[in-house]
Image (cartoon, rainbow, N blue to C red):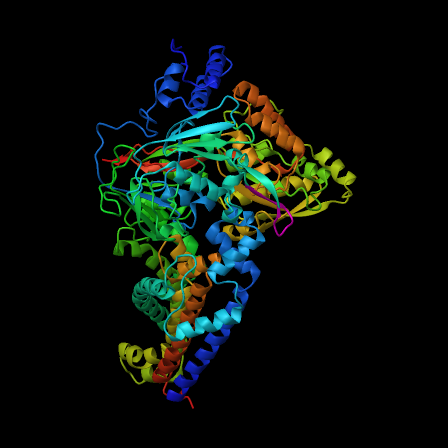
Amino acid sequence: MTSRKPTQSDHPKVHEAFGLMKAGRMDRREFIRVAALLGTSAATAYALAGLPEPAFAAGNLPFPADDPNAKAGGILKIGMEVQKMEDPATYSWVQMSNQTRHTLEYLAMTGPDNVTRPMLAEKWDAAEDLKTWTFYLRQGVMWHNGEELTADHIAWNIERWLDPKTASSNVGLSTFSAMVEETPEKDAKGKPVKRMTKGALEIVDKHTIRFHLNKPVLSAPEDLYNYPTAICHPSFKPPISDNMIGTGPFALAELKVGDKCILKRVKKTTNGKDFNYWGGKVYLDEIHYYNFVGDNQLSAFASGTVDGVYEFSVEQMDLAKSLDGNIVIARTAQTICCRMQVDQKPFSDKRVREAVTKSVDNGVIKNLVYPTGGDIGQNHHVAPVHPDYAPLLPPLKRDVAAAKKLLAEAGFANGLELTIDVGNTDGPWHQTVAEAMRDQMKEAGITLKINVMPPSKYWEIWTKTPFGITAWTHRPLGTMAMSLAYRTGVPWNETHYANPEFDKALDAAEATLDVNERKPKLMKAAKILQDDSVMVLPVFRPVYTISAKNVHGYEGHPTQYHQFNKVWKS
Amino acid sequence: MLKLIGSRLLQMLLIMAVVSLVIFAIFDSDKFKKQIAVAELGGFAVSALSDQDYQAWLDRKGLNVPFYDRYFKWVAGVARGDLGRSYEKSEPVSQLLAKRLINTGMLAFWVFALMVPLSLTLGIIAGMKEGSVRDRAVSFIAVLTTSLPEIATAIVLTVILALGLRWVPANSAMVNGWDWRQLILPVLTLVLYDFGYVARMTRASMAEVMTSQYIRTAVLKGLPYRRVILRHALRNALIAPFTIIVLQLNWILSGVVVVEVFFQYAGFGQLLLDAALFGDVYVIQAATLVAVFIAVLSQIISDIGYTLLNPRIRFS
């Protein structure tokens, strides 16, 4: 263990966390994550924890250290779906954000080690009550048009995200949900319109911005790397692909939706000045994304058409192993929710929902779809990979007799017929899950019809269907996933779940720094959700990717975010 | 003949008018407008839009005007050569369509160049002596390749030739520019699938001709067998396959979606599928017009060819 201690300049909670670590109540990895979130540099946090800093970041930069053997130049070709880029604040696919990630950057960046480091922000600090966060921007960050990034620009972005007209999912993130309040205005559905709280944003000076939150939030920096929080220039008007002004080392040279997205290094600003990138050396000349859907990505890699892929499926693992490449496996919180809308019949009757969840064996389903890797889900959205997860809840057990009894009590003694909508938005394994559920539910007297539809069709109805399978991507914290999807009234609350007791438990978890103290609080919220039987969440899946042997520094990220600043080709 | 062509072209215009109107009406529904919004903004974002903001988005996209207004505007545009702009790909439809038609045309050319001689030769050889070993062997192969769905043939060929032997690339995306090697697998898949059908039709036609009185007479007259086949049997035996071959034009244009998608070949079929999934109405409209045009054109070619091959047939 280290002999170093936090200094006066570190946040009081860092001292607290350090004490917890010394007492053995917080592991060293968690301490590093918490210290970095509270403004301590990643290097210092690693030193305090007595660990060497990994190659994920160097100095005050969020990127890995320069590789002395690195060769500059070359084109990195990636197989991925090439999608339309309309408005970064309303992105609903990680692929869209990958296309802009090297142009539009973020205030913070979470690395593959789950540690969040400053990116466009040079550092941040938080008040002791975690309700006031101050972000200090790097000075001299240059937009592609030659202007300097200022706090006004950040404020413009945040105000835009919080404007109901933008319809950004960012509103559901803990940090931003703590910056809005209900107004007397009502929308067409009669719901109160939420707007930004007056004074929630304070521009301290040209390079400093302060958030005043109406509740304590621990995950502010992590929220600022959520993929729809890319920072745009205030001149932005959708679609972003028409005039993308960013701060990143690459600019969009060509976009053909469904074909290719070509990014080229920025050498000059649009007003003719030399472009100085704040983030140090970048090796590649160009990044090319080529449109390959699903399983075609690996066959493109096998042909040597691309140097790496966004993802390949579990069914392709044997093929991937036979190829000359580096396979990267990331344990994630990516999942599917076979969720029921709690205000729609027959799911408005909790006994029906319970009958559904009790008739299904999650372990069997997990082993069927992901026999290697992945974790069994427990019908709540906190994954074992989340640092705030704890195995405090007893494993779920299938109970067909209880399911039948509940159905009878609900008035379905002669059986119940249900239809589940499946869009296979994340691959055909969604349908396999539905088929396994159908077979298991049959024993309990539930006839499950599976309504398969194209992915795009499913996204039209995902918030409307009473019973459907929705894919959710990885979020670094369990609290983030729970807050986005199950908090009362948030835009992505597809279950229409509204439980003040749950919201309160989640608030309490989000306001707790001590991870050992937070774990039971978060699991309390998870238990409430589990007991209310709003979904069957059978598996947290691993993600697989592969890169060519001559590609160096290609990291697997649990959210599949691409950050190729230090990637090079030999 | 000119009258026939004139009447077919008139029919074509009528079909185009009716089909385009029907498509516009269908795609004017709230359901399809929502489909476009979801595809463009994402399902998560659309669900967060208020009704008022959704209506504002429809206004911006020009989708909030009555469909007949949009339809007549589109018809006027088509008359000027403007097929509209793709919602999904943000490109003029005419440019998009031209590129995809060239790609599919290239694919079709090689498929026809290989499939027609192969299937005619094998069909004729098989039909010359019905029931012979040659006939049975050709029939067996033809039935086998035709009964395998294109997707199965594509997978088998990819596994063996691309992933196993590594002789050819596994996809046809042409990422690094035009590469004829990338055309091998889709062409081979389509040839294998289609040749059996044409070969069997040719074989049936040839076998029928070989049993006719005039062939028997020619043989009994002592004409050399080669001359009987080439001068007397072949012309009549080719009438039926000719029609079938010309009609394959339709199939190759819009029926090869599976092959184009599997090999990621940027052709007309893949464009049509993408547009249908996105609800990209202007692309669907333009693609439909092209499909109708090709269908009518292939019928005209078929009718003219039929007349030339069979002098007994005359159109009045």
Q: Is residue B272 above or below residue A345?
A: below
Q: Which of B119 and B103 is in front in this view?
A: B103
Q: Is residue B36 above or below residue B75?
A: above
Question: Which region of the structure is painted magenta?
Answer: A185-195
Q: Where on the picture, by quarter, is residue B120? A: bottom left
Q: Residue at x 49, y 15 (%)?
A: A16
Q: Is A59 in the magenta?
A: no
Where is residue A124? Give x, y as percent: 41, 27
Q: In this view, does B250 lie to the left or right of A55?
A: right
Where is residue A454? Give x, y as percent: 51, 52
Say which quadrant the N terminus of chain B sits in: bottom left
Q: Is residue B24 above or below residue A107?
A: below
Residue A311 visible to the viewer: no
Q: In this view, does A340 lie to the left or right of B99?
A: right
Where is residue A175? Give x, y as percent: 51, 33
Number of marks: 0
Q: Which of B190 and A307 is in front in this view?
A: A307
Q: Residue furthest top?
A: A3
Q: Which residue lies furthest to the bottom in this view?
A: B316
Say which quadrant the C terminus of chain B sits in: bottom left
Q: Is residue B49 left or right of residue A352?
A: left
Q: In this view, does A79 lie above or below B141?
A: above
Q: Which of A258 and A247 is in front in this view?
A: A247
Q: Residue at x 64, y 39 (%)?
A: A497
Where is residue A147? Give x, y as percent: 30, 42
Residue A289 visible to the viewer: yes
